[in-house]
Image: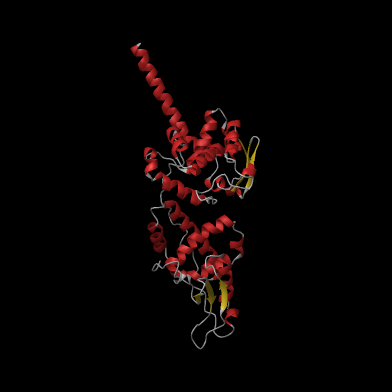
Amino acid sequence: MGRPKSVNTYLPNGVHRIVKPNGKTYYYFQIARGTQAEGKRIPLGTDALHPDFWRKLAAAQDGNAYGGSAPAKPKESWAELIADYRASPEWERLRDRTQKDYASYLNTLLEICGDRRVRDLTKAGIYQLRDSMSKTPVAANHMVSILRTIIEWSIPREYRDDNPAIGIKALKKDDSGAQPWPDEGYSFVLEHAPEDLRRMAYLGRACGQRREDLVLMRGVDLVQDGINLLIGKLRNRKHFVPLTREQVRELKSWRVGELDFFLKSTTGKPFSGDHLNSRWNRWRESDAATPIRDLKMTIHGLRATAIADRREAGTEDGAIADELGLSVAMVSRYLRFADKARSGRASRDRREKRLSDKLA
């Protein structure tokens, strides 16, 4: 895949940056800069990671942008392909959250092989990239998926003639999934964790939503018998989650302003889903969390806990799906650990009863 470069120093061909005395950085595109054939200097903005930067760069790389001073060379590098893709209608149709997700992986590609030719990438190179990310198999497989998408997009635009990402085998990942929190772990968090994480645990178990949606819940969303929310994975579909009187009473006791968020950092700033996850993992690794260090407790596990709570209360799977805004199939998938635990406990209870009957 080529030599790695720093995201802070890598710039596409023809792009340079100027740091003003006030410390602000400005980016410009200029063909053949510093030579007799240099073209017009075209401003690209101040943020090389912003979609507008890539739109302006794509326009500047167009033959008309050279001002006739030099012919446009055929587009062939990953930097050029990524710039084209980010300026395309297909990119515009992606949701903001998807654009942000894709941008992270595309920036990684820029670091690794921005100046390399797209047509030189082989299946072996893709496997090499995938394997270099093997510590995070979900991310590695997602990188291959994005590669498959962008290369397929590049074919009718003559970057290459085939798609080597098709047929790449995914890395096997831990399929244990999200497990409900053990009672002792949940109780420990409510008693000993910092306030922001105690609230996270309570809100996550009450509402059963993903962390990206938990961080967006505000005081105004809480109503008399539940909470209104948006499900990001379903294109911000509006949904209502019914809550118990005790849950509503607890959330109201936090005294969150109508336009304020239930979950905020210790400095009072709103969380992103990733920021909240990092905050949780850092605390989990601290000495304060030593008593629950060996327990499997992810933020996503709170969703499984919310589902298990409702099943334990006798709610049918279809009703659980309606309450939390997911499919019945997903309810069954989340419950597989709870069902195994319930079955195991029932078996233990029968065994103890038989032993007790023998001794009686």
Seen in the picture, residue 329 relative to 127 is either above or below; the reply is above
Q: Tell me which colouring the rendered structure shows.
A: secondary structure
- Which residue is drawn at the image coordinates 41% and 20% (left, top)? 350
Instruction: Give residue 34's position: percent from left, percent from top.
Output: 48, 84
Q: Nearer the viewer, residue 132 or 46?
A: 46
| Coordinates of residue 29 in the picture (x, y in percent) | 54, 77
| Residue 333 visible here | no
Kindly indicate the quadrant of the structure image that contains residue 10: bottom left
Q: Going 37% across and 43% down the picture, which residue do you hit? A: 287
Q: Which residue is drawn at 39% across and 41% down?
A: 289
| Quadrant housing the N terminus | bottom left
Q: Which residue occupies the extreme left position in the image?
A: 359
Q: Position of residue 137 (x, y in %)?
A: 42, 52
Q: Going by the picture, which residue comes out furthest to the top? A: 360
For this view, does 6 lie left or right of residue 271? left
| Residue 217 position (above or below residue 67) | above
